[in-house]
Structures are given as C-alpha cells and as structure tokens.
Amino acid sequence: MRSIQSLKAATMFGLTTLSLASYAANGADTFMNGQSYYGQPTSQASAARIVDIASSAPINIAYGETVTFRSGGQQFSWTFNGLGGRAVDVIKIAPAGFAAKSFAVFVGRDPSTRR
C-alpha cells in the first residue's frame, strides 16, 4: 500500500515538474498558446504613433493602440491588445537584435473589461 502511495506521489511530482518546465520554456510573458500578454507585432502602416526610445520618457498607451518604436536606425511596431492595465518594458516585446534601453510603456485597461 505504501509503495502505491509513493508511486502516486512520484507521478504527481513528475507531472508538476513537467508543467513548470513547459511554462518556463513558453516564457513568463506568454499564454499557453504562445501569444504575448501584451499584444502582438504588427505592420508599421497601422501605427497610430511613432516613439523614439532614445529621446522619450515612459509613455501611456491606450488599450488597442498601435505604436512604432524607433531606436537608432531600427524600428518595430506593436499593437497593445493583450492584457490591459499593465506596464511593459519595450525590451520584453522588441524583436531579437533590436537595440533598446529599458523603456516603460503603461497600457490602459481593456474597455470591455471595465466595471
């Protein structure tokens, strides 16, 4: 009887470890489907505003707003339609190779979830 309980405990431990490992592999800022908590990259043509990271202070973004971020000669665009009411560092959402300093973006709440 005791060996069955030990086997159950070991199995649960293994499953928990596997779950945590897959969560870590996914990244702490993504849902299980791989989508970012903060939104998604988008085309520059749909950007409502352009922000030069080198010469700007932290900014406020409306939920659903699309912004193009520039740093030196590089740029990328992002639509903030993930989880609203959060702050994000641009380094977390910038594409690989994008040279940027730490830059805070404060995303407004999703209007559909306000009470």
Image (cartoon, rainbow, N blue to C red):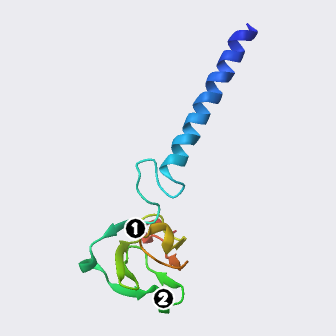
Where on the picture, by quarter, is residue 13? top right
At 36% from the left and 80% from the top, the residue drawn is 74
At 48% from the left and 78% from the top, the residue drawn is 100
For residue 81, the mark is: none
Residue 68 seen in render: yes
N-term mark: 2 or 1: 2
Q: Position of residue 60 (x, y in %)?
A: 50, 83
Furthest-bottom residue in this view? 55
| Position of 3 relative to 31 (above/below) | above
Furthest-left residue in this view? 45
Where on the picture, by quarter, is residue 79? bottom left
The residue under label 2 is which amino acid type?
Answer: Ala
The residue under label 1 is which amino acid type?
Answer: Pro
| Mark 1 residue element | loop
| Mark 2 residue element | helix
At 48% from the left and 49% from the top, the residue drawn is 26
Furthest-right residue in this view? 2
Q: Which residue is mark 1?
A: 95
| Position of 16 relative to 69 (above/below) | above
At 35% from the left and 79% from the top, the residue drawn is 75
| Position of 3 relative to 93 (above/below) | above
Q: Which residue is mark 2?
A: 54
Horizontal side, residue 48 vs residue 93: left or right: left
| Position of 113 relative to 18 (above/below) | below
Which of 99 and 90 lies nearest the eye of the viewer?
Answer: 99
Q: Position of residue 67 (x, y in %)?
A: 37, 80
Residue 114 seen in render: no
Q: CA distance from mark 2 to mark 1?
A: 17 Å
Horizontal side, residue 41 vs residue 107: left or right: left
Q: Position of residue 11 (x, y in %)?
A: 62, 23
